[in-house]
Image (spheres, rainbow, N blue to C red):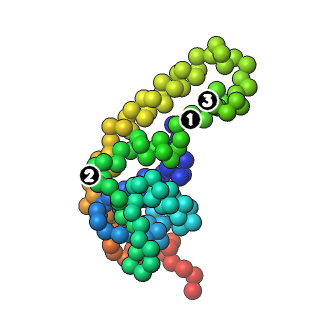
Amino acid sequence: MKLTSFTDYSLRVLIYLACEPGRRATIAEIATAFEVSENHLTKVVHFLGQAGWLATVRGKGGGMQLAREAGTIVVGEVVRQTEGADLPAECFDRDGGNTCTIARVCRLHGVLQEAADAFHAVLDRYTLADLVHNRTTLSRMLFIGRERPETPARRQPS
């Protein structure tokens, strides 16, 4: 199964914040660490806050941090909330958009559902804490709490 960039970024934000629990980070900081768009991360952070996974503080000295312990955030739950439960096949369209002529007798629907259930079952076995078991290494790689050094590819033209 292919995850959307929204889900990918959601997991990245949560992983980043779980590396140093209790420390606030900004959208700009996380966007820089992962080299992704701040605009897209803003939407992700808003969603994660609404879902109860992030606590945000506005203004100077503000930022975001995990709203719950990393061990209570189940990866499968995050993926289901960010991806939605439906499979990307017409026969899963609940709004009457299924025009497949063999839908009533086709077994593909059941096979895809079984595959999706297995996919989610694996994700449900892991929490955010499991994903950051190597938090020291992750923090170092992401320059959490430190200035990212400039590399030739990242330098701005003079």
* Circles 2 and 3 in contact, beta carbons < 8 Å: no
Give neighbour class at mark 3: few <14, some 14-19, many 20+ (Cα, 10 Å). Answer: some
First in sequence, mark 1 or 2: give its number.
1
How far from the left and from the top, in percent, is residue 158?
A: 57, 86
Give neighbour class at mark 1: few <14, some 14-19, many 20+ (Cα, 10 Å). Answer: some
Secondary structure under tag 3 reads helix
> Of 10 and 93, which appears nearest the observer?
93
First in sequence, mark 1 or 3: give its number.
1
Q: Nearer the viewer, mark 1 or mark 2?
A: 1
> Of 103 and 139, which appears nearest the observer?
103
Measured in 3D between alpha carbons, the distance from the residue under mark 2 to the one under mark 3, in whole angstroms, is: 36 Å
Which residue lies under the disc numbered 2?
133
> Of 12 and 148, which appears nearest the observer?
12
How far from the left and from the top, in percent, is residue 101?
A: 73, 19
Secondary structure under tag 2 reads loop
Which residue lies under the disc numbered 3?
92
Whether residue 120 sits left or right of residue 91 in the image: it is left
Secondary structure under tag 1 reads loop
Which residue lies under the disc numbered 1?
86
Amino acid tagged 2: His
* Circles 1 and 3 in contact, beta carbons < 8 Å: yes
Q: Nearer the viewer, mark 2 or mark 3?
A: 3
At horizontal 48% and vertical 51% (from top left) the residue drawn is 8
First in sequence, mark 2 or 3: give its number.
3
Amino acid tagged 3: Phe
Whether residue 129 sits left or right of residue 80 in the image: it is left
Answer yes or no: is residue 131 visible: no
At horizontal 28% and vertical 58% (from top left) the residue drawn is 135
Answer yes or no: is residue 107 visible: yes
At horizontal 36% and vertical 44% (from top left) the residue drawn is 74
